[in-house]
Amino acid sequence: MSSDAKRIDQLRRDLERHNRLYYVEHRPEVSDTDFDRLLRELQELETKHPDLVTPDSPTQRVGGEPIDAFKSVTHTAPMMSIDNTYSREELQAWHTRVAKGLGIEGGLFGDGEAKVICVAEPKIDGVAVSLRYEEGRLVLAATRGDGRRGDDITHNVRTIRAIPLSLSTKGKPPRVLEVRGEVYMSNKAFLRMNEQREAEGEELFVNPRNATAGTLKQLDPKITAKRGLSFFAHGRGECDPDSFESHSGFLDAIQKMGLPTHPLTRRCGSADEVWAFIESFMTERAKLPYWTDGVVVKVDRYDQQRTLGATTKSPRWCIAYKYAPEQAVTKLLGVEWQVGKTGKLTPRATMEPVFVAGTTVRHATLHNEDEIIRRDIHIGDTVVIEKAGEIIPQVIEVKKELRPRGAEAVRAPKKCPSCGGPVVREEGEAAHRCINPECPAQLRERLIFFAGRDQMDIDGLGEMSVNQLADAGLLKSFGDIYGLKNKREELLKLDRMGEKKADNLLAGIEASKSRGLARVLAGLGVRRLGHKAGQTLASHFGSVEAMAQASLEELSDFEVGGKKSGIGPEIAGAVHAFLHSDAGRHIMRELRDAGVDLTAPRNAPPPTDTPFSGKTVVLTGTLDSFERSALTEKLTALGAKVTGSVSKKTDLVIAGHEAGSKLDKANELGIEVWDEAKLLGVLKTSEG
């Protein structure tokens, strides 16, 4: 073995050891700076020797390439929710139910030896995930989802340093081990991220739990890697072989394998011990660097858990005791309306500083104007704020008897605070929105969506690229995308933008010009205008000019194939308003001048001589050869009606990988099912 190979091996062992000391044993030996120095040395050596890079190397946590979409996966054992309780009496009632379920007289705990041991664990306010290890290596991470199916988030979970990519052999991991736990964000990381979002004019996350959920659903793992997520294990799914007899024994075992469990978890042999833990942790939790909202109490022995079983939603062998929210009184000094990426205006209260739940706070969310009116909030009011798991507190009460004379009622602005454009509130909605498509507060997210695979499909223009180009002043409008071909030299000056990458980006932009009007309409981010409605409008009117000349009634009241189009007044109104706004006219003019195709073939009678003519088709699962929207367009052009649900009227189901309940229902009803190979063969014949 070469000296570099030996050093790489040693660095990996050192970094894994330091991760274990920090996250599992809670006794770090090196500073973050020293850890990062070791990691950089390993990265440099692996760059020098790419053949020595392994999937479980610590360097692979920085994040790979972005994915196109999340895949749904089925849990081998359901991930159930836990019932909540809020008082000692309710907790005692649970004790009584458990005792009865186990056939124990006199309650769970006797005067002498405990009849049932319970485990009390801090309840982390994060996102539940399942980790699957096979032969000691992490192969899958999934969200809870609906409890039976969740999203595959392995690409993001691999970036979390607290989660080992491979288990320590000293712990003798079973062949298959599924660990359930909580991914969370520290208070410090949460506040830092929100400060950055506020500076960039983006909507703030309300609490660390929501921020964690949003981070785990990022398509680009490099973003996840920067947000400082962590993890505690607290349960199990499938284990093969399963030699565990108790929850406490399971936690001890997985800790030896390198998985972090909460250090304050305690086995309790009496009801008094459980309550003493709940009371002591109520004080202790304020010192923790992450948010907790209660204590989970579980029956320890697995045979007793199996005896107790579960309801349709929750196990009977555990309960969550949740603490009452902390409150404080302060004075409202002002309200700032922040513009989010979709144009939504969110009111944020500025208050006299007050200490609550371990921190001094100056700001609180007011949600929307309806909530403000319901609470009758005025500037200068004395208000009660609450931090019920919310790092950014909420105003929950107004002390109207203390209101100063002449206090001004808080109302939504008529003009956008970011661009000065009109603000509207549509019927049936609580939110006010800026409707200017070029509002700086919204533009970046609109451009990211416009370039997406199901819209203009511009290869190389993802979230990171849009932000990089916007930061450099190269993207300020939709038209600027198509002007990048004249700014190649500026592109090449950007970080990590080499000749090949720039050429690929420009080629992707050029190719997008021919996508057609339906894709353009779907990509503009006009509210309520999706892919199907965009296709219907484009096919009926044939050009954006014809759409612009149409009246509101003509946009909503037309037929396709002898039936109502399904557009309706709400979609028509949004499209009409966009096409007749100054910003909308400017965007379409820019795209037209850039050579983007703003036309579409007019509706023709559907073909009657294809294998799909007149058939109702449902797509389910993931197909390797097609994006869902593109296949829908193709089948529709061949005379099919593509719908979203399986019924007795369905003629054909096309099933890809991980097809779920739709496939099951098709088999139940005896509906014809094709796999992707059959679909490709039929398409080749019908098109050839």
Image: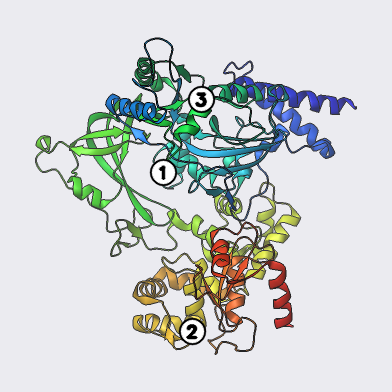
299 w.r.t. 129: above or below: above
**Relative to the observer, which residue lies in front, 557 or 131?**
131
Mark 1 highlights which residue? 204
Residue 171: image x %, image y %? 68, 23
**Relative to the observer, which residue lies in front, 55 or 190?**
55
User: Looking at the image, is mark 3 or mark 2 nearer the viewer?
Assistant: 3
Label disc, if present, on residue 540 of the rendered structure: 2
Taking the image as shown, residue 372 lies to the left or right of residue 297, namely left
The N terminus, quarter of image: top right
**Relative to the observer, which residue lies in front, 549 or 271?**
271
Q: Is residue 185 visible?
A: no
**Relative to the observer, which residue lies in front, 336 or 397?**
397
* Residue type, mark 1 in image: Leu
- Separation (CA) of disc 3 from disc 2: 66 Å
Which circle's residue, 1 or 2, is located before the other in the chain? 1
Instruction: Categorize mark 3 by other alpha carbons within 10 Å: few (<14), some (14-19), many (20+).
Output: some
Which circle's residue, 3 or 2, is located before the other in the chain? 3
Mark 3 highlights which residue? 301
Which circle's residue, 3 or 1, is located before the other in the chain? 1
* Residue type, mark 2 in image: His
The C terminus, quarter of image: bottom right
Residue 378: image x %, image y %? 18, 43
Label disc, if present, on residue 525 of the rendered structure: none
Taking the image as shown, residue 548 lies to the left or right of residue 472, namely left
Taking the image as shown, residue 310 lies to the left or right of residue 681, namely left
210 w.r.t. 298: above or below: below
Residue 116: image x %, image y %? 44, 20
* Label 3: which secondary element: loop
* Residue type, mark 3 in image: Arg
